[in-house]
Amino acid sequence: MSNAETEPAEVRCAASVSEEPRVEVLSARDVPLGGPRAMTVRRTLPQRSRSLIGAWCFADHYGPDDVAATGGMDVAPHPHTGLQTVSWLFTGEIEHRDSMGSHAFVRPGELNLMTGGHGISHTEVSTPRTTVLHGVQLWVALPEEHRHAERDFQHYAPKPVRADGALVRVFLGSLCGDTSPVRTFTPLLGAEIVLDPHASLTLAVDPAFEHGVLVDQGSVRLAGTAVARAELGYAGPGRDRLELTNTSEEPARLLLLGGPPFEEEIVMWWNFIGRSHEDIARARQDWENASDRFGEVHGYPGDRLPAPELPNTRLRPRGLR
Ligand code: MN
């Protein structure tokens, strides 16, 4: 996925740890993704009051969309640096191609993790047989010592595990006795949880982690606080258990994200993560110059995405609490 904002702000991101035991509820803003009919995504990270949850630094949630109406996903070749992308679908199928030569299909319940590292480019297109598209794209910030890592692409289909009144798919990290074999550069948790009607689930979690709960469907309470569909509930570190309740007659589905607070300040602009304005300006220039840094994607019938103009002003730290 590419950030399709026409004037993306340069965002300085840093962990803002809440000492407050209360759960914070973050609402989404709608962002057009571009493509033929500008399919819209609901973005909950980053936002003014919170930039990161662990190393999770970007969360786009979309659908269920009737592809005949939205045109589906069609993201032309675009670059990434300093981050990993996580694609996770509930319905539909996306064809992924990247400058390592990877050609993969993203399908429901299967993790596709792309490491941008020093630089990669890719395309993401919903397939012709997709009628309904529904899923998320998440980004993970890479820590300083690994932010120039080599490009990589990994696929993993977790076996669902049954917990109290819930079905859990652990795609990154450990939960409910299951551990994903996929390597991450900082400790991370990523899991899909489907709660039975009226089920209540108490999860043992790492107290060093902060957690986010992105609700995809249903009425969910996180540690007693209602989190509505498309909202992101945030629980700070210091908890060794998290209680999730489905208050409805229907199954509820959510993603649980977590990690220890990310200790570095990062700068996010467009599809890049760096540590300074200069890092971002260099990445942009390298993309505009078609540098080997990002390589070439083959098999996409169209032009690559141009980078937006950099803002005239140097980035300023975003208001963080
Ligand atoms: Mn992308």
Image: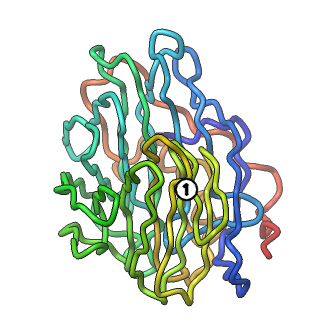
**Rendering coords of residue 48 (x, y %):** 77, 61
Mark 1 lies on a secondary structure that is strand
* Residue 19 visible in the shown view: yes
Q: Percent from the top left, x then y, of residue 58?
A: 55, 56
Could you say which is closer to the camera, residue 293 or residue 248? 248
| Residue 283, position as x, y percentages in the image | 52, 55
Which residue is labeled 1 in the image? 58
Quarter of the rendered structure image containing ligand 1: top left
Q: Looking at the image, which residue is at 54% across and 66% down? A: 212
Residue that appears at 43% across and 74% down: 202
Please name whichever residue, 312 or 264, is drawn nearer the observer in this view of the structure: 264
User: In this rendering, does residue 138 appear at all?
Assistant: no
- At x 29% / y 36%, what residue is drawn? 96
Three-letter code for the amino acid on which mark 1 is drawn? Phe
Q: Is residue 74 left or right of residue 12?
A: left
- Near mark 1 (Cα within 10 A), the count class, few <14, some 14-19 or many ≥20, is many
Horizontal side, residue 308 vs residue 147: left or right: right
Direction top: furthest residue: 68
Residue at x 47% of width, y 17% of height: 66
Total count of labels: 1
- Any atom of ligand 1 within 8 Å of the CB at mark 1? no
